Image: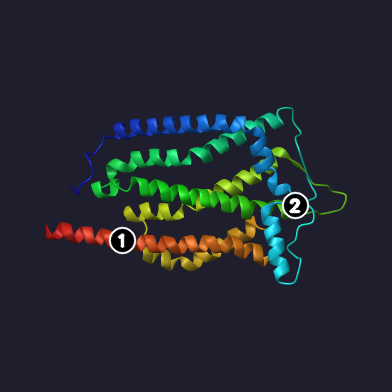
Amino acid sequence: MSTPQKEMSFLDHLEELRWMLIRSSAAIFVFGIIAFMMKDFIFNKIILAPKNINFWTYRFMCNLSKSFGTEGLCVDEIPFVVQSRTMAGQFSAHIWTSIAAGFVMAFPFIIWEIWKFIKPALYEKEQKGAATFIVISSFLFFLGILFGYYIITPLSVNFLGSYTVAKEVRNNIDLSSYIGLLKASVLASGMIFELPIIIYFLSKMGLITPDFLKKYRKYALILVLLLAAIITPPDIISQIIVAIPMLILYEVSIFISARVLKNEKKKAKKITVK
């Protein structure tokens, strides 16, 4: 059979959406508790690691710089102190960081819930791709998380933490501000890396075509370079490092959109012949 399942009513969709949100929230809560109990590892080994000059990214950039006969990318110190200026500052940071970590760990389950929600609108052949959808979506998300953590975060921390307007002004960074930068960099990268998946469904709905993506490629290029300039230090190497993966994702999205359009045309021809 090549037709979607029986159409659900609007109220049925709302009920399914409600339970999807409940189950996803429960998963985030459970993983959040696990993250809460792993406080030392999460804060000392993950959250505060990009502040250490021995962080992997800084060593890699320094070795890369030395291979070109210079030490311009080597980091000798990150001159700022992370502090908490409110009574509940550290406890609040612990709570919200645990929730964010819970979301990251629960992402494959959340994707599974989203798949179950959209499944009734898909054809039988498409419904069999659940495992592929979950694996690819999770892989892209975690790849984006790693990119945000190992590339965007240390570049931003090093630049912003070392930037001064005068010698008399010291950088004593509030804990919430530091964690906010890290979470924004990491989670935003994770969601940006979901672009091929988003394009796939938009193409399935007929809202996006490969011709549209190709037509606005030059504008996308400008937007990517602008975004890279905003989230990285003002040096060309850092901007290129951030921009290249985003441009690759855009080109992959064009390919995916073209494949979807080709498959939809084949289906339309089969229906016409029948």
Apparent side of residue 13 relative to residue 184 in the rendered image (left or right): left
In the rendering, which numbered label is found on residue 232? none
Instruction: Give the image location of residue 24, x and y in percent.
Output: 44, 34
In terms of sequence position, does the residue under pointer 2 or pointer 1 come before the other?
Answer: 2
Element at badge 2? Answer: loop
Counting the numbered discs, the total is 2
Q: Of the residues shown, which amino acid type is indicated by label 1?
A: Leu
Residue visible at 65% across and 62% down?
238
Apparent side of residue 172 relative to residue 216 in the rendered image (left or right): right
Q: How far apart are marks 2 and 1 (CA)?
A: 48 Å
Element at badge 1? Answer: helix
Instruction: Give the image location of residue 104, x and y in percent.
Output: 53, 41
Residue visible at 77% across and 53% down?
162
| Observer able to see residue 223 | no
Apparent side of residue 50 relative to residue 228 in the rendered image (left or right): right
> Looking at the rendering, in which quadrant would you find the C terminus?
bottom left
Residue 236 sits above or below residue 87 on the image: below
Residue 206 sits above or below residue 84 on the image: below
Apparent side of residue 237 relative to residue 108 in the rendered image (left or right): right
Q: Of the residues shown, which amino acid type is indicated by label 2?
A: Ile
Instruction: Give the image location of residue 241, x and y in percent.
Output: 60, 62
Residue visible at 65% across and 66% down?
237
In the rendering, which numbered label is found on residue 53? 2
Residue visible at 71% across and 38% down?
175
Front label number (2 vs 1):
2
Name, please, the residue furthest toward the top.
87
Classify residue 33 by image quadrant. Answer: top right
Task: Please tell me how crowded label 1 is: few (under 14), some (14-19), or many (20+) other residues with Cα within 10 Å.
Answer: some
Residue 146 sits above or below residue 253 on the image: above
Image colouring: rainbow
Mark 1, residue position: 261
